[in-house]
Image (spheres, rainbow, N blue to C red):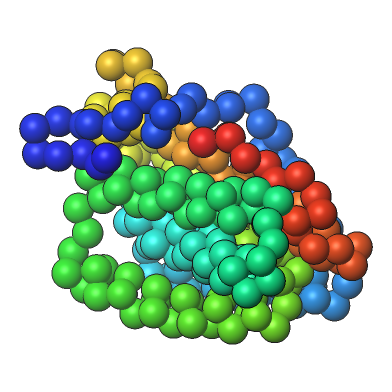
Amino acid sequence: MEPSGSGIVFRPWETYTADLSINLTKHHAPVTFLDKMAYWTVKSLRWPTDLFFQRRYGCRAMMLETVAAVPGMVGGMLLHCKSLRKFEHSGGWIKALIEEAENERMHLMTFMEVAKPKWYERALVITVQGVFFNAYFLGYLISPKFAHRMVGYLEEEAIHSYTEFLKELDKGNIENVPAPAIAIDYWRLPPNSTLRDVVEVVRADEAHHRDVNHFASDIHYQGRELKEAPAPIGYH
């Protein structure tokens, strides 16, 4: 269940504690043509984002999460349909990708409490999501290895953005307000947690998604299907 007006009503199994020890510096060096295309596609998307949001990291996070929540849902949906067509199991990958999408959605719900987006920012979100969903859907149909690699690089950029967010908080340029109740309940944070604590756990989540998607792309590069490798279930 989701938050209600009277308080947060997550069930225990819908919450978790983020792994803050995860390596934040890992980078998959692009070698193949598809890898380089995925890398530079993500890099090219960063420029207009930097131009529009500049140092408004709360609004930047909101936009980032509306995009980041799409790939897991698209990938999970396509694997789900494939499982139905072929009467076969997915090896847990449907659950893993849907789990990723839900986690990214909770990031968005959290930053909505912090950023309070303006009407034109909401309009931009609708436009970007509509374009990105359809583009990613087609991209995944054509080349899952490219699609997962691109998400891996997108998550690397997310880690960088949240690291810059933390720097601005530490400098005092962004007020370190109390953590929203939804974040405290979802990540099992202490009651006195702040925005900085929230950004740290969100960044750790993005690092996990980075590893999952690079792993998924590597499986495809080996000429195998995702179901042939164990799905990373249970992180969230």
Residue 135: x and y in percent read: 54, 82
Identify the residue at image location x=39%, y=73%.
129
Left or right of 43 on screen, residue 113:
left
Nearer to the camera, 44 or 28: 28
* Residue at 48% in and 25% down: 17
Q: Is residue 120 above or below residue 22?
A: below
Q: Position of residue 52 (x, y in %)?
A: 38, 70
Q: Is residue 51 left or right of residue 32?
A: left
Q: Is residue 48 visible?
A: yes
Residue that appears at 34% across and 39% down: 173
Of residues 114 and 110, the one nearer the viewer is 110
Give how far across and how far down residue 189 sits, in percent: 37, 21
Residue at the extreme left of the image, as rendered = 6
Q: Is residue 134 left or right of residue 147?
A: left
Does 158 appear above or below 163?
Answer: below
Residue 41 placement: quadrant: bottom right
